[in-house]
Amino acid sequence: MIWLIVLVVVAFVVGIPLGKKLFAKQEQLIDEKKAALSLAVVLRANGLKLLPQVLEDFAVGNVADLFIQLKNLAVIAKSGNDAIEKDLEQVYERVLDAKLKTPEGLALIKAKVAATGVK
């Protein structure tokens, strides 16, 4: 009977701190997944297509698709395929268009062009 009491006490002494530590790690992972999803939304809104899909798969815990997407990105990068460059070009065009719509952005672009010495 005494062994049962000792076993229960040891289980509580070890189990409670261990449970708290595991819960804290889970909370940290949830925060990282939320941040990844937020970043995916921003990147997709700015025109990127490839990287947001990877971040979304991570955020929802879709590990199988995450590895497939990462493999596809690696294949694209190694193959010299210009899909990544096209993705970035679309983002550049969106940012440039947004800058040209504001007086401050237009002035910034004019100043950068002037600084290059190109006429």
Image: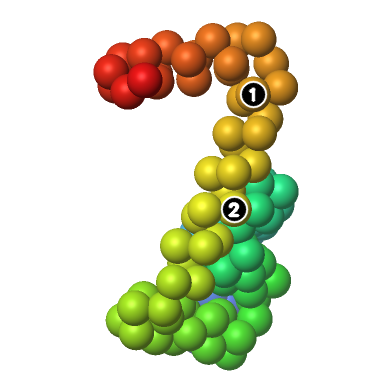
Q: Which mark is residue 100?
A: 1
Relative to 14, does residue 28 appear above or below in the rendering? Answer: above
> Where does the N terminus fall, quadrant-wise?
bottom right
Residue placed most toward the observer, 78 or 1: 78
Q: Secondary structure at mark 2?
A: helix
Q: Residue at x 47, y 67 (%)?
A: 84
Q: Which mark is residue 47?
A: none
Residue 118 visible to an observer of this rendering: yes
Position of residue 61 measured from the top left corner of the image (x, y, whole percent): 64, 76
Position of residue 11 measured from the top left corner of the image (x, y, whole percent): 53, 74
Q: Residue at x 52, y 53 (%)?
A: 89
Looking at this view, name the residue that lies furthest to the front: 119
Position of residue 115 measured from the top left corner of the image (x, y, whole percent): 31, 15
Relative to 37, does residue 115 appear above or below in the rendering? Answer: above
Q: Secondary structure at mark 1?
A: helix
> Where does the C terminus fall, quadrant-wise?
top left
Whether label 1 touches label 2, CB < 8 Å = no
Quarter location, residue 9: bottom right
Q: How is the image coloured?
A: rainbow
Q: Residue at x 50, y 55 (%)?
A: 88
Relative to 90, does residue 114 appear above or below in the rendering? Answer: above
Position of residue 106 measured from the top left corner of the image (x, y, whole percent): 58, 16
Q: Is residue 114 left or right of residue 90?
A: left
Q: Residue at x 28, y 18 (%)?
A: 117
Cα distance, mark 1 to mark 2?
Answer: 15 Å
Q: In the image, what residue type sits under mark 1? A: Leu
Residue corresponding to mark 2: 90
